[in-house]
C-alpha cells in the first residue's frame, strides 16, 4: 500500500513539477493558468487538513517552477497572451497565505520574490481585467444591437431589414 506522503510526492514530481508536463500544459493557454491555480489551491487544502503531507519543498518547487519559471517555458508571457495573468496572481497569493499562516517558511529571497511579484501583478492584472471587461461590454452591445461590422447592413439583423421596408 502506498502512503499519502509518497503519493503526493510522486504526483508532484511526475506532473506538476515535471518540465515536460508543465510545457505541454501551458500550450492550453487560459485553461493552463486556471488548472495551475486549482493545483495550488489543492496543495493548500492538503496543507491545512493533513499538514505533514505537504512540506516546504513542495511550496518552494511550485514557486520555482511557476513563479520563477525555472523551466524557461515563458509562463508569464503565455498567461499574459491568454489573458489569464490573474491565475498566476492567485497562485502567488495562495503561496503568501501559506507563509502568512506559518505553514511555509520560505528562504528570504523567495519571500522577497513573492512580495515583488504580488506588487507587480496588481497593476498588470488590473489592466488585464479592464481589457476583458471592455471586450465583454462590446460583445454584449453587439449582441443587444444585432450589430456586426464584418457583415453588410442587411445581413446584420434580418428583423431590422423587415422593419426598414
Image (cartoon, rainbow, N blue to C red):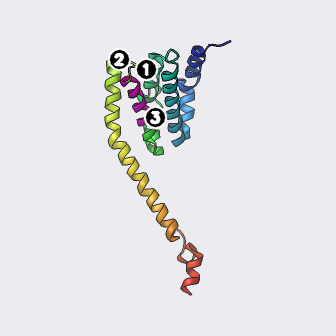
Asked if residue 149 shows in the view, the reply is no
Residue 121 vertical position relative to residue 64 in the rendered view, above or below: below
- Residue at 56% x, 74% y: name it: 157
Left-right relation of 126 to 141 = left
Which secondary structure is most common in the magenta stretch? Answer: helix
- Element type at marker 1? helix
State the image quarter where residue 101 is shown: top left
Kindly identify which residue carries mark 1.
60
Q: Earlier in the sequence, mark 1 or mark 2?
A: 1
Looking at the picture, how far across and down is residue 8, in whole percent? 57, 19
* Bounds of the magenta segment: 88-100
- Residue at 55% x, 24% y: name it: 18
Residue 117 vertical position relative to residue 141 in the rendered view, above or below: above
- Residue at 50% x, 68% y: name it: 144
Nearest the viewer among 152 and 99 is 99
Q: Residues within 10 Å of mark 1 (few under 14, many from 20)?
A: some
Kindly identify which residue carries mark 2.
107
Identify the image quadrant of the N terminus. Answer: top right
Left-right relation of 63 to 5 = left
Residue 83 vertical position relative to residue 42 in the rendered view, above or below: below
- Residue at 39% x, 47% y: name it: 128
Q: Nearer the viewer, mark 1 or mark 3?
A: 1
Identify the image quadrant of the C terminus. Answer: bottom right
Looking at the picture, how far across and down is residue 15, in whole percent? 58, 25
Amino acid at each position: 500500500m502506498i502512503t499519502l506522503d509518497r503519493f503526493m510526492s510522486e504526483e508532484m514530481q511526475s506532473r506538476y513539477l515535471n518540465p515536460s508536463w508543465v510545457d505541454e500544459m501551458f500550450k492550453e493557454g487560459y485553461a493552463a493558468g486556471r488548472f495551475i491555480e486549482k493545483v495550488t489551491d489543492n496543495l493548500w487544502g492538503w496543507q491545512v487538513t493533513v499538514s505533514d503531507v505537504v512540506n516546504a519543498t513542495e511550496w518552494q518547487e511550485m514557486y520555482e517552477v511557476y513563479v520563477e519559471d525555472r523551466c524557461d517555458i515563458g509562463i508569464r508571457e503565455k498567461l499574459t497572451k491568454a489573458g489569464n495573468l490573474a491565475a498566476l496572481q492567485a497562485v502567488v497569493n495562495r503561496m503568501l497565505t501559506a507563509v502568512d499562516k506559518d505553514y511555509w517558511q520560505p528562504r528570504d529571497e523567495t519571500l522577497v520574490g513573492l512580495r515583488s511579484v504580488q506588487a507587480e501583478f496588481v497593476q498588470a492584472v488590473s489592466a488585464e481585467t479592464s481589457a476583458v471587461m471592455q471586450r465583454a461590454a462590446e460583445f454584449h452591445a453587439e449582441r443587444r444591437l444585432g450589430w456586426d461590422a464584418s457583415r453588410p447592413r442587411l445581413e446584420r439583423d434580418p428583423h431590422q431589414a423587415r422593419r426598414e421596408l
